Image (cartoon, helix red, strand yellow):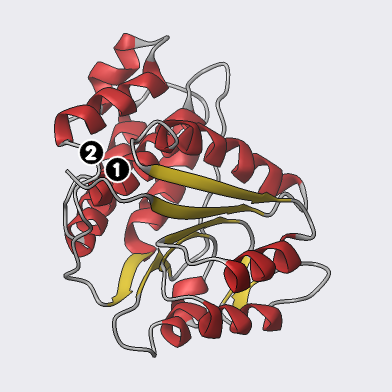
Amino acid sequence: MSNRVFECLVVLSESDVPTIISSNLASLSIDIIKRVPHVRVTEVKGLLYPFMMTNYLKQKRFDMIIYFGHGQKQGLHNYLTGSEWSEKICSLSDAIFYSYSCWTASGFGVKYVDKPGRTFIGYTEPVFVAWDTLEWNYGRDYAKVITEEILNIFSGMSLAEAVRVAKDRWATLSQFYNILDTVEAKFHSDLTMRNSRGHVILGETARNLPLLITRHEAINLIKLLYKDSEREWSLLYA
């Protein structure tokens, strides 16, 4: 088990309704990730995140960047600065880049991994941001897939295998929604399958991080997302 502090920069753009919902989803995951020993999380929030993110990357070395916000093929998108600013990131950091945002793996991610040894995990298609409703905790399900993927990386799984497992989780979740007897289930099923289809890893795919948490510990942390609903946990977790 590694004792070295693993530095993680989390960026929550929170610039409009979709990204505020995305931030709420991310918060469920980040609260769990903060419980991992030797992982230190630095959070950046709000419309001015491009400036704060850039400043942090100039001042400190991070092992992983986790981004929740708008994306375009050209890069991370912000209403104040567009997406061109995000090219600066390619010269500021070699961190593993995990992006829950639309299209960024189709352009920006390709640029990011131009430098050997880098890894970008993201999506080639629009991503859907779910939220909990009275009929089902869709948002919590999404947080589970994202949290498990990151914890799998922390527990020694290769980056490529962690992405493969996440793609399978999205697909399984889509199939589950397809048979779930709720009003919004079919809508969520279709968009969740799109998440599975568009999820990719670019660059150095065979990397393994130093072991930060055991698999058993990771599963117990993920269960905290469902602490109020053992039924949902038993239905969804394989």
* Residue 186 shows in the view: no
Q: Looking at the rendering, which quadrant does residue 72 occupy?
A: bottom right
Q: Is residue 197 left or right of residue 127?
A: left
Picture disc at residue 213: 2
Please name whichever residue, 136 or 202, is drawn nearer the observer in this view of the structure: 202
Kindly state the secondary structure of the residue where label 2 is placed: loop
Residue occupying image coordinates x 50% and y 32%: 28
Dot 2: within a 10 Å radius of its alpha carbon, few (fewer than 14), some, or many (20 or more) residues?
A: many
Circle nearer the N terminus (1, 2)? 1
**Residue denoted by label 1:** 151
Furthest residue toward front: 3
Residue 85's spot in the image, x, y percent? 69, 80
In this rendering, the count of numbered labels is 2
Question: Image quadrant for the N terminus?
Answer: top left
Q: Is residue 52 left or right of residue 31?
A: right
Dot 1: within a 10 Å radius of its alpha carbon, few (fewer than 14), some, or many (20 or more) residues?
A: many
Residue 24's spot in the image, x, y percent? 61, 36
Residue 237's spot in the image, x, y percent? 23, 28
Residue 90's spot in the image, x, y percent? 52, 82
Kindly state the secondary structure of the residue where label 1 is placed: helix
Q: Looking at the rendering, which quadrant does residue 172 occupy?
A: top left
Is there a contact, CB below 8 Å, between mark 1 and mark 2? yes
Task: Give the amino acid type for the residue marked by disc 2 in the picture.
Answer: Ile
